[in-house]
Each structure stands twice: as structure tokens, then as C-alpha cells.
Amino acid sequence: MAVKPWVLGLTLAFCLAGGVSAQTGQNRTDTPFFLFPHAQSDELSGNWRFSWTNFLYQPRLSDDHSLNRPVRYSGRSPSYQAIAPPANALLELVRDAREWNETSGPVFVAKSTTLIAPQPDPGPPDIAEPEPPVASPGEPIDPPIDPPADSITPVIGPIVDIGEIPYVPMPDPLSDASVARFLQQASFGIRPGDIERFQELGIEGWLEWQRDLPRSEHLPLLNEWYRSSTDQRQQDRADVWWHHALNGEDQLRQRMAFALSQILVVSRVHGKLNMSAKVLANYYDLLSEHALGNYRNLLELVTLSPAMGSYLSMMGNKQANLSNNRFPDENYAREVMQLFSIGLEQLNPDGTVKRDANGNTIPTYTQADIEALARVFTGWSVAEYWCSKCDDFPSWFGSMQADETLHDNNEKWILGEYFPAGQGIEADMAQAMDMLFEHPNTPAFISHQLIQRLTHSNPSPAYVRRVADAFRDNGDGVRGDLFAVVSAILMDPENQPKRSPEPRKIREPLIAMTSLARALQLRGDERMVDYFESYSSFGQAPLAAPSVFNFFRPDYRQGEVALQGLASPELEILAWSTFVQFNNRLWAVIQSRDSGPAGTLYYSDASLESLLKRPEYYLFWIDRNLMAGRMSSSLKQRLLDHMAAIPASELGRRIEEPLYLAVTSPEFLYQE
């Protein structure tokens, strides 16, 4: 039987991302471990069978069974198997989170509820009907309604093949689960009070509020934190990024800036920029300033940015001199078309590829177009273009300046458009920017990439068309309005919660970590000093892509994903080393309770301690704030079993271990 589009590639990735305890017969492991899946098709039944047979990494257990950091383990585990229908291999991991309601059809098990006032201590754990948890100051909690005595939501009726379930109407858009899901996409994670504020403002009100908030700037804070050595300064710049991602109120702007930084790529992996952390911070501020503005303005400012001019070698570009065998540098001319505006192939309005009469794709530009556009980009530079450490030169913090004497003022033909001779360097630049911005490819090309970064790795052509239409016209006749674009992405009908085997995307490691850190409200007595180990823990870091093609390509695909013509961009960086480092960093953050040395962050466990009187309430907090109400009942049961094995007196373990199990499970990285 044919494999569903996402069955193998994404299933492997999600399983590799982490694990939870497994149970086989009478033998159960109550500690987290990482599982490697082996997939095999049963040709007779059409089922896919997944067997986990090797421990790859297992947390070391001390004599008292306390959990320590993961280490290499070479033993073998009992075999654990899950048999799923062919359309349901990945969602076998989470299918227990759903039920079939005989009266209203398929619904989520984890239902959001209204706020219930704090109640007294509910009493000993054997009470059949526990009371709601005590809400800690500043952290409202929505407890489950009437949880059963065993604290596990029962499955009502048969578990149906999720591959057979049709779409269902969107639930209440202001329910806790819906809002949490929206904030996962539009921000760096949920902090206490975020859901309630969103519910008060409504979707459009929240978006407008975010648009109008003051901007969190990187460069001013970096000036305060700037240390002496090159490596320290890049750590400082990353720390500023973390500070704004975790604490900045302008979450939508900062999340869009991060998405744009993966399209309009500039990176520290470059000689001058590696030694110029302030120049990079200034570039990021440029992105955040225009993240909800107009793409035409942003494209020109990026083109004239000294950071971009240095990174893609446009700075100091000169007109041809045939006697010296000198020709304009073509690097930026190529990348601004290929990556920043029109792409390689002509597109339909919905982003699908146009084809000629023979079925071949149609290139958007030729080598002659690249050479002519390179001539447009001559004559731009800064006074101190020769610097190696450029943070001390003011010219690197504005736009590059025009020098007519170095510009090619001859006529040019680019993409079929005529550039007249002698119109001047600035007119040539303005015409080139207008040409790329107005090109019919640009709305769909940019919209598709922004959708991928925020909501969906494989948006339908209809989804892309609707967002691209918002790019073409925001409703007031304005083209390129990025606020209209991101609003269209987030509020599109295709971005509704649904019951379908088709995956949305997986979280990037950085986004997953910010989600955990914001939920825990990490804070410190002093500024952090590389607390997150930014350049070694995630396979990515702000403005640190290995090339202009970002950390991963938007069309990256492998295995069954490739065979089905789908993309899975984030999988390109999810190597073994990334998984180990990322999970180790998750464990380090979870252990940062109550206090920490200078330069580190920590969280207060007081608000979580009250929830431990009823373990199901602690899991509800994890589910609500980290998984948007999607935690499966099987994962809940495993976490409850694990908590039941920890003595009540061991508060640290009861907080840390279930949380670590949850955030290293595949379900945490899955974004519906």
C-alpha cells in the first residue's frame, strides 16, 4: 500500500526529537529515553509497523533513581511496537489525544474551559472529584472540568482512523486552546497572562495592538552588554536576541523579524561580520523596524545595508574596465532575484510553477539579466569599506552611499525592462527595486516562505494565493504591506485546527526553546551570559546561517517526503548532534529552578508547586502552555505514571522530570 505523504520522513524526525517511557508487558521504564524507529510495511494488512529496539540516549539514573543529564547508552531495550493504519503512522503517537463523540463527531479530548476561581486545598489524592488548582499570583490557570477519579480523560467511543476523519468546523477562536495555538505561531511562546489578554482584545484587536507597540531594539542593548573579544561580542548579540524574544512585548514584530532574517539572510559566518556584532545587531533592527511595514521599502534598505553589501559583496562594486579585465560583481544581483524577490521559476498567482508547451519550467531570469542587474548595483559603498572590525565606524550603521564615478551609466535591459543611459545611480537603483517588487512572482514567492516560517510547511496553492493577494493589495490599494500579509497568514481558513493526517510543520529548535523559556518566565538577577549556549545547542542561531540559503532550504525534502513531493525544511538541521545538544540544553533549563549564578537565568517553582497537589493539574499547565491543548492521553498517562513513582517529598524531581519528558516528546515539536 502506498505510504502517506508524511509517513516516513516526518515520523522519523519526530521520533528522533525525543522520547517518553515505554511499556511492554509487565516491564516498564519510568525514565525518559530516546527511541529509534524502524518502519516496515505489512503488505497483507496494509498496516505500518514501527518497532523501537535500540536505546540511543538514556538519562543516567543515580542510585536513588533521580534524573541526571543524558549520556550515551549502548544497551538494548525491550521491543515496543505500535501498529497503525497506513494513513496514521505519525499520529499513532498522538491519536489518544482525540476521541469520537457520538453526538457531535470528532473533537479534541483536551477541551479549554473558562477560568475557575481559586479554591482551598482539594485534600488528599484519593478524592474522586478533585477541586480546581490554586491559581498563583500573576498566573491564571484554567483547570479541566470534572476530571475523572483516575485523572485520565477517557476515550468515548471507538478510536477512528484519523486518515478517514473529515475537517471539522473551527472551534471557538477565543478558547484557551485556540488562542494558545495562535500564539505559538505569532509569538515566541506563551507567558502567563498572554492568553487572557488575547481573549480580551480579540484576534484583530491583538494584531493591531502588536503592530502599534514600541519596537524592541537590539543595538542599544548590545551597546550596554558589549564585551571585549570577538566571540564574546557575538555571544552578547545572541543574548540580546534571547532577551527580546523572551521579554519583549512586541512579539509579532520580533517573530516576523526572525522569519525575515531567514529569507533576507545576512550571517556572522563572514570575515568582517564575524568581527562586527554591532553591525549585525543594526541589521536585525532594520528587519524588525520594517517587519510589519512595506516590503518595497525593506528590500531597498536591505540592498543598501552595509551588512548586506559586505555579506554578498555588492559594497565597492565598480563599473567594468575591460583594459583591466574587471567586471561588476554578480553575487548580489543573483541572490536578490533568486532568494529575495522573484525566485528561479515563473509562478502562477498561487505559487504553483508555470510550464511551457513541453511541460518544462520557465526560468525567471537569464545570465544576461544577472550581468545587467550587476551593473545597476555598481557605485555603492561606505567610507570605511576596508575595515575588518567595523563596529567603530558610523558609516556602517546607515545606508551605503552613491558614487556616480564608479557607476555604470550605460543603458541596460533587465527582465525585458529598459533602463535608459545616463539616468543616474539612484534612478537605476529605484527602477531595479520597483521592477523586482512589482514582478508578478514576488507576492507568491515571499508569501510562501513566510507561511512556511510561521504556520505550514506545505501550504496549499489556495492558501498561498490568498496570502499573496493580501501582498498584492491590502484592501486599500497598497502592495507589499507585511502587516496585511502576516494577518492573512495567521487568520487564513487553512490555518484552522483540524483533524487530518496532513501535518502542519515542526518547530525550529530555537522556537521550541523560547516557548519553554517564556512559559517558565525565566529571569535573572543580572544579564545573561551565553546562558542558552546559542552557537552550539540548536543547529541555528540568530544571524548565523551557514550560507545565504539559511539554516535549511524552503524546499528541503528527503525520503518519503521527497517521493510525495512535499517539503520539510526544518528536518535539514535536525541531525543527531543537534538532537543531543538540544535535549541537553532543555534539561539544563528545566533544572534552573529558584536561583542561579551570575549570567544565568532561572524560574520560580512556587507557581508550579501548588499544581503538584494534583498531578493532572500540572500536566494541564504543561499542555495548555506548551502544547496548546494537544497532549495525547497516552502521553498524559505515561507522565502520571512517572510522577506516581516519585515520592511527594522530592519536589524538584516532580517538577523537572515530567516537564523534561513532555518537552522531549515528539508531540512538543509538532505544530498543528
Image (tube, rainbow, N blue to C red):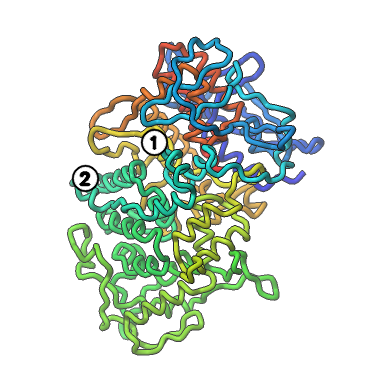
Q: Residue at x 39, y 28 (%)?
A: 590
Q: Secondary structure at mark 2?
A: helix
CA distance separating discs 2 and 1? 21 Å
Residue 369 located left or right of residue 270: right
Residue nearer the viewer, 567 or 202: 202
Residue 510: image x %, image y %? 42, 43
Residue nearer the viewer, 76 or 492: 492
Image height of 234 relative to 308, above or below:
above
Residue 112 visible in rendering: yes
Residue 347 located left or right of residue 476: right
- Circle 1 packing at 10 Å, graded few (<14), some (14-19), many (20+), is many
Residue 490: image x %, image y %? 52, 52
Picture quadrant of residue 308: bottom left
From the image, which quarter does the N terminus lie in? top right
Picture quadrant of residue 60: top left
Image height of 223 relative to 352, above or below:
above
Residue underneath mark 1: 517
Q: Residue at x 37, y 29 (%)?
A: 588
Residue nearer the viewer, 146 or 357: 146
Residue nearer the viewer, 317 or 97: 97
Image height of 242 relative to 211, above or below:
above
Task: Kindly identify the amino acid type of the residue bearing the numbered disc 2.
Answer: Trp
Residue 450: image x %, image y %? 49, 57
Residue 551: image x %, image y %? 45, 51
Q: Residue at x 57, y 26 (%)?
A: 145
Q: How many marks?
A: 2
Residue 609: numbered disc:
none
Residue 77 visible in rendering: no
Tag nearer the camera, 2 or 1: 1
Q: Residue at x 34, y 52 (%)?
A: 213
Residue underneath mark 2: 225
Task: Kindly identify the amino acid type of the residue bearing the numbered disc 1.
Answer: Ala
